[in-house]
Image (tube, grey):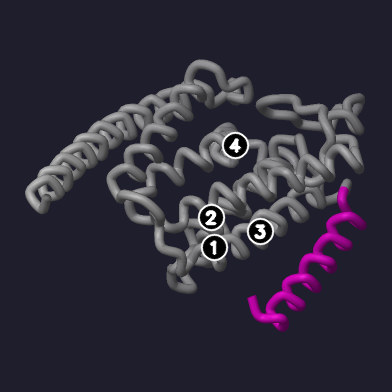
Amino acid sequence: MRPKNLLLLTLIFTGGLFLTERYDHELFFFLNCAPDVPMVKTFMLSLTQLADGAWVIMIAMILFPRRQGLVLALILAFLISGGIVQAFKAAWPQPRPTVLFRAMEELCVLGLRNTNSSFPSGHATAAMVLARFLAEGGSQLRVALMLALGSLMALSRVYVGVHFPADIWAGAWLGWMVTDATLRFFRHKKPVGDYFLRGALASGFGFLLATYFIFFHQEKIPEVKHIFIMAAAGVAVLLALRTLYYSLQWGMDLSIRRRLFRQAE
C-alpha cells in the first residue's frame, strides 16, 4: 500500500474512532433494533451469523477453485486479525452493551447474549476479512459493493445489541487492513504442490468445518439456526462431492505420472 493511501486510511480510522467513541452510546441506541421490523431483524441476524468465523472460512473454501492462490491469504489474515482482537480483549477489557445497559428497558438484544469483552468486534473483523477477499481483483463497483456488504455485516452487531459502534469501527478497519496486506503479499505467489491435491485438501477441510458447524458449533443464533444448518448441510454436500472429484483426479494424475516415469526408465 502506498504511504499516502496508508496515511489517509490511518487518518480516516483515527477520526472515525474518535467520533464513534465520542458518541458511542448515542449511536448505539440510534442503531439498536432500528427499524424494529421482523423481516429486518431476520436479515440482520443472518448477516451477523455470516460474520461468524466458521462461515467466513466455509465461503472461502467454496470459492477455492477460482482463487486457490488467495485462500491462504484469507486464512492467514483471519488468524492474524483474530489474534490481535483477542489480545485487545484480554489486555483492555471493555463491557458490552448487554452488561453496561442490562437494567435498561431500551436495550434490545437479539440472538446470543454475549457478555465477554466488547472491544474490538471479532465479527466485524471477520466480516471485513471476507469483504476484502471478495473485493480482490474486482472493479471499483465490486469493491464498493463488498465494502457495503462487510459494513452491513459489521453494523448488524450493533443492531442485535451486542457491540458498540466504536467496537465495529475498530474491528472492521483491522480486518480490512490485515487482509489487504496478506493479499498483497500472496498476490504474485504461485501455489505450491499439485492442483488437485490442494483442491482435495481445501474441500475436505471445508466439509469438516461445515459438519462441525451443524453438530458442534456453540454460537448458532437460535432465530436463524435452522436456516444456517440447512445451508451448512448444502455446503457439506457440495464440498464432499468436490473432495471426491479432486481426489479421483489427483489419483488418476498420479497414476499417469508414475506410468510415464516407469516408461522413461
Decide whether residue 168 is among the magenta residues. no
Alpha carbon distance from label 2 to label 4: 18 Å
Decide whether residue 3 is among the magenta residues. yes
Q: How many numbered tags mark residues here? A: 4
Element marked by disc 4: loop
Q: Earlier in the sequence, mark 1 or mark 3?
A: 3
Residue position marked by numbered label 1 in the rendering: 183
Element marked by disc 1: helix
Corner quadrant of residue 173: bottom right
Q: Residue at x 76, y 45 (%)?
A: 85
Alpha carbon distance from label 4 to label 1: 21 Å
| In-front residue for pair 246/113 | 246
Residue position marked by numbered label 2 in the rendering: 73
Name the spot of residue 232 as percent of width and height, x first: 43, 28
Q: Which residues are magenta?
A: 1-24
Q: Residue at x 50, y 16 (%)?
A: 215
Element marked by disc 2: helix
Query: Which residue is farthest top?
Result: 215
Alpha carbon distance from label 1 to label 2: 5 Å
Q: What secondary structure prevails in the magenta region?
A: helix
